[in-house]
Image (spheres, rainbow, N blue to C red):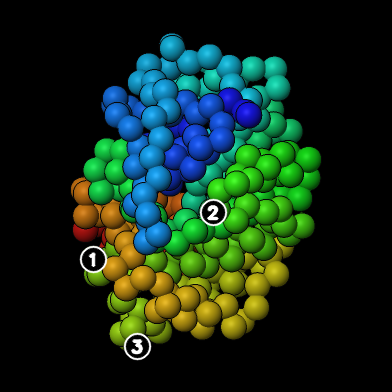
């Protein structure tokens, strides 16, 4: 049994904390007090009652820290680290984008594990989550990655290492960047059935592919069509985090999902007009 701190109690953090609490000691680091956690699934409901902390000064060292906050909340998440970090503590950064390793420079690089997660989940109320399918996790194929994977033994979440993490990260970004169409239309995954919208999604992904290849990712041309197909096969009412943030009036992760493609595209001299334009419209409409 490991002692695990989960920073953030949103859709991803709450769902992971609930599953991990079935076999580990879990501490949830949140802004506000929570009661129990409850994850609703098609095959039933799982519950957990982890310790919930709201004051970083109450934190004590753990074996693992899982940071599941939004990318724009890294500063507030970092406030928990002094109390949670021990001499052997490892930090798993479970966030969108391709810059997970750079977000917490105060932690030694050899103790940071970047994580790519595909877990369709939504928070319907504090501590109340809906998990649409089992989900998957990918981490680098090294000692830290292997240790992280073992945390999920006995859960339904498929955690595994990958020898090409760069490609896995950019492949996930290709999916995420296309999700801006839901953020703008405020329609769930079913919006991809509109052929006009689908073609916009393909354009966004093609820009991501071009930039990702320059960053070392092995991305096939067919990925643009695949992303559209995967979206049409998702639960039609599935809401991505960009869409959910807009509905809730929160700041969005458009920087980590779209503008990172624009920034790195400029670095390599690759034009990314669709990502740049739709990100600008999303920001202006917030």
Please report contact status of discs 2 and 3: CB closer than 8 Å, yes or no. Answer: no
CA gap, disc 1 and disc 3: 17 Å
N-terminal label among 1 and 3 = 1
Quarter of the image for residue 237 reads bottom left
Q: Which residue is mark 2?
A: 156
* Front in this rendered view, residue 151 or 203: 151
Binning the other alpha carbons within 10 Å of mark 3 as few (below 14), some (14 to 19) or many (20 upward) gives few
Residue 202 at least partly seen: no
Q: Residue 60 placed where, x, y %?
A: 53, 14
Binning the other alpha carbons within 10 Å of mark 2 as few (below 14), some (14 to 19) or many (20 upward) gives few
Q: Which mark is residue 281?
A: none
Task: Between label 2 and label 3, give the one nearer the viewer.
Answer: 2
Residue at image location 24% in from the left, 43% down from the top: 125
Task: Say left or right for 226 vs 30.
Answer: right
* Front in this rendered view, residue 280 or 168: 168
Q: Secondary structure at mark 3?
A: helix
Q: Secondary structure at mark 2?
A: loop
Binning the other alpha carbons within 10 Å of mark 1 as few (below 14), some (14 to 19) or many (20 upward) gives some
Vertical side of 56 occupied by 206: above or below: below
Residue at image location 45% in from the left, 62% down from the top: 133
Residue at image location 47% in from the left, 26% down from the top: 27
* Front in this rendered view, residue 185 or 86: 86
Q: Which residue is mark 1?
A: 186
Q: Residue 44 placed where, x, y %?
A: 37, 54
Q: Which residue is mark 3?
A: 195
Q: Residue furthest bottom?
A: 195
Q: Residue 22 placed where, x, y %?
A: 51, 37
Q: Secondary structure at mark 1?
A: loop
Which quadrant, please, contains the N terminus? top right
């Amino acid at each position: 049994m490991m002692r695990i701190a989960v920073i953030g109690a949103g859709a991803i953090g709450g769902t992971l904390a609930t599953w991990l609490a079935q076999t580990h000691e879990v501490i949830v680091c949140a802004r506000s007090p929570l009661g129990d956690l409850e994850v609703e699934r098609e095959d039933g409901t799982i519950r957990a009652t982890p310790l919930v902390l709201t004051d970083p000064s109450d934190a004590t060292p753990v074996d693992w820290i899982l940071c599941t906050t939004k990318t724009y909340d890294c500063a507030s998440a970092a406030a928990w680290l002094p109390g949670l970090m021990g001499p052997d503590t490892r930090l798993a950064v479970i966030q969108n984008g391709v810059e997970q390793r750079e977000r917490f420079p105060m932690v030694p690089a050899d103790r940071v594990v970047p994580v790519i997660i595909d877990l369709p989940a939504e928070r319907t109320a504090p501590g109340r989550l809906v998990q649409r399918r089992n989900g998957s996790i990918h981490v680098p194929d090294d000692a830290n990655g292997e240790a992280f994977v073992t945390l999920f033994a006995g859960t339904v979440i498929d955690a595994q290492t990958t020898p090409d993490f760069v490609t896995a990260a950019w492949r996930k970004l290709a999916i995420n960047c296309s999700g801006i169409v839901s953020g703008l239309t405020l329609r769930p995954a079913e919006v991809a059935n509109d052929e006009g919208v689908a073609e916009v999604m393909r354009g966004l992904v093609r820009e991501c592919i071009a930039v990702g290849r320059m960053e070392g990712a092995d991305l096939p041309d067919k990925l643009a069509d695949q992303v559209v197909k995967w979206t049409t096969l998702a639960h039609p009412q599935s809401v991505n985090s960009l869409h959910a943030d807009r509905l809730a009036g929160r700041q969005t992760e458009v920087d980590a999902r779209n503008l990172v493609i624009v920034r790195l595209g400029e670095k390599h001299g690759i034009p990314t007009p669709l990502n740049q334009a739709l990100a600008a419209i999303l920001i202006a409409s917030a």
